[in-house]
Every structure is written in C-alpha cells, then in structure tokens.
C-alpha cells in the first residue's frame, strides 16, 4: 500500500500554493527461478598422528579441486587441526589430534551433487566421518544482482508515472526530486533435510533426490520525493 505525505509550502498565502512536496513509498517485485543447488558438508577425523589426519583431509581437498578445477562451484577447503586432551585426577592427558574440513558448494543439478559425493566417498579414509547438510535450491548472487538492477529501473519508472499522475491531479508541474532505495527482501532457500547427515557416505547408497524447487520473489522498496510547482 502506498503512503503519501504532503508538505505544502505556500509562498503566496490565501491566493495560491507555489510549491508542494509529496513523499510516497514505492515497491517493485520480480519473480525469480532458483538457479543453484546449495549444499554444505564437512569431514572430521581423530587420530594420535597429526600427519595421518592431514593426509586424509588433503586427499579430500584435492578431490574437490579436481571436481571444481576453476574454483567457481565450491568454497572452503581450509582444515582445522587441534590437540585433544582429557583430564583425570586434575591432570591433563594428551589423547591425540582432531581435524575438521568443510565446504559450501553451489551446483546446477542434483546429478552434480551425487557425482561429487561418490567421488569423495571413493577417496575418503574409513576413519573420516562426514556430515552432510541440507540441500536447498536458491537464487544465485549473480541472478539477484541482475534482478536488482531491473527492480531499480522499475521503481524509477513507477516514480515517473506517479509524478505525471500528481501533475494531472494538482494541475501543477510535478517531478521526482529524490529516490531513496531501502533494500531488498532476502530470498530464503527451500531446504530439504539430508537424512544421511552425520553418517559415513556409502558408495552403494541411493543417490540423493532433488529437493523442492519453486520460484522466489525479490522485492525492492523505495521512498520517493516529488516536488510540484505552479505551472507558469
């Protein structure tokens, strides 16, 4: 709903109003089709030997890099390695090391996801645990940025049309004096919980099914100021 605020600046009292300022809230929306399949997965391992953990995690990093040779699909790949301790009788006992590694990927199809998971399973050491996050179709940042430019143009078009309407209604010359964009409403991905989370990937397991895909709406709000002057 549009809200209008009128501010009258009368330079000629009683006779005529020389200038009128109007403020409206405008909104433009665009429906977008999700174009990327988002997923997050991580690996963990515990061992007495830190080099064993490094070797196993580096093998997984190398496999992701082979899958995404241009580095355009997956982010992450830096692992964390820390010592583990237990305490008994107020004494600290060294238990070994713990390592973790995580990735976030944006894929185009569920087939890509299943291929990646199969390749990782083939190169994963038996002692490495994997945690698979939810799958979600979402609109990529690139698509959102393109849509945002389109929405800004649409808001400006709406503002120009509204200025003409004000001119017709007030019999004054109205024009857009300022536009303040207030941001977009975030698009929330549609998630599908992965029932294999926190379990080892099995090569013989059934490939993951594609999650729900539905269009999302991106909206842009703006505050528009108009100035109306008496026609000469």
Image (cartoon, rainbow, N blue to C red):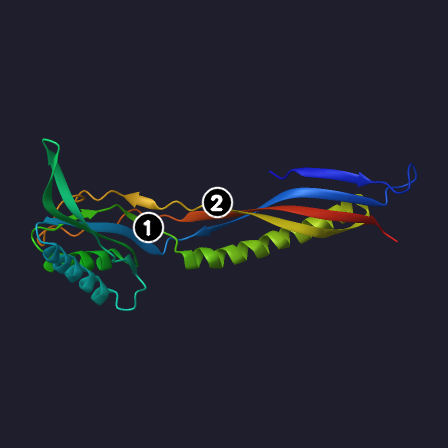
Q: Residue 159 carries which label?
A: none
Whether 175 is drawn above or below 195: the answer is below
Q: Residue, x 69% and y 42% (percent of image)?
A: 23
- Residue 188 at x, y = what percent? 39, 44
What secondary structure is found at the residue carrying circle 1? strand
- Rounded to the nearest angstrom, the CA distance separating label 1 from label 2 is 17 Å
- Are dots 1 and 2 in contact, CB under 8 Å? no
Q: Name the residue under label 1.
A: 137
Which of marks 2 and 1 precedes in the sequence? 1
**For residue 3, side relative to residue 136 (left or right):** right
Q: Which residue lies furthest to the bottom in this view?
A: 70
For disc 2, the marked residue is: 185
Residue 127 is left or right of residue 15, and the answer is: left
Q: Residue 36 in the image: x percent, y percent?
A: 33, 56
Name the residue at 44% across, 46% down: 186
Q: How crowded is mark 1: few (under 14 residues within 10 Å), some or many (20 or more)?
A: many
Residue 48 locus on image (x, y percent): 8, 50
Q: In this view, does 135 lie to the left or right of 126?
A: right
Q: Extreme top residue here?
A: 89
């Amino acid at each position: 709903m549009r809200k209008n605020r009128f501010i009258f600046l009368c330079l000629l009292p009683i006779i005529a109003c020389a200038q009128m300022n109007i403020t409206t809230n405008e909104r433009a929306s665009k429906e977008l089709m999700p174009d990327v399949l988002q997923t997050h997965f991580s690996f963990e391992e515990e061992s007495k030997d830190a080099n064993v953990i490094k070797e196993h995690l580096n093998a997984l990093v190398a496999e992701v890099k082979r899958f995404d040779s241009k580095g355009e699909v997956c982010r992450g790949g830096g692992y964390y390695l820390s010592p583990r301790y237990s305490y008994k009788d107020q004494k600290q006992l060294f238990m070994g090391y713990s390592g973790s590694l995580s990735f976030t990927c944006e894929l185009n199809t569920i087939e890509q996801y299943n291929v990646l998971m199969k390749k990782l399973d083939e190169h994963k050491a038996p002692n490495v645990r994997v945690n698979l996050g939810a799958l979600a179709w979402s609109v990529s940042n690139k698509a959102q940025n393109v849509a945002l430019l389109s929405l800004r143009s649409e808001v400006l078009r709406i503002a120009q049309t509204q200025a003409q309407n004000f001119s017709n209604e007030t019999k004054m010359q109205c024009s857009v004096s300022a536009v303040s964009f207030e941001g977009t409403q975030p698009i929330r991905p549609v998630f599908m919980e992965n029932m294999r989370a926190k379990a080892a990937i099995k090569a013989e397991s059934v490939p993951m099914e594609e999650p729900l895909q539905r269009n999302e709406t991106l909206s842009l709000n703006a505050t528009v100021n108009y100035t109306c002057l008496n026609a000469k």
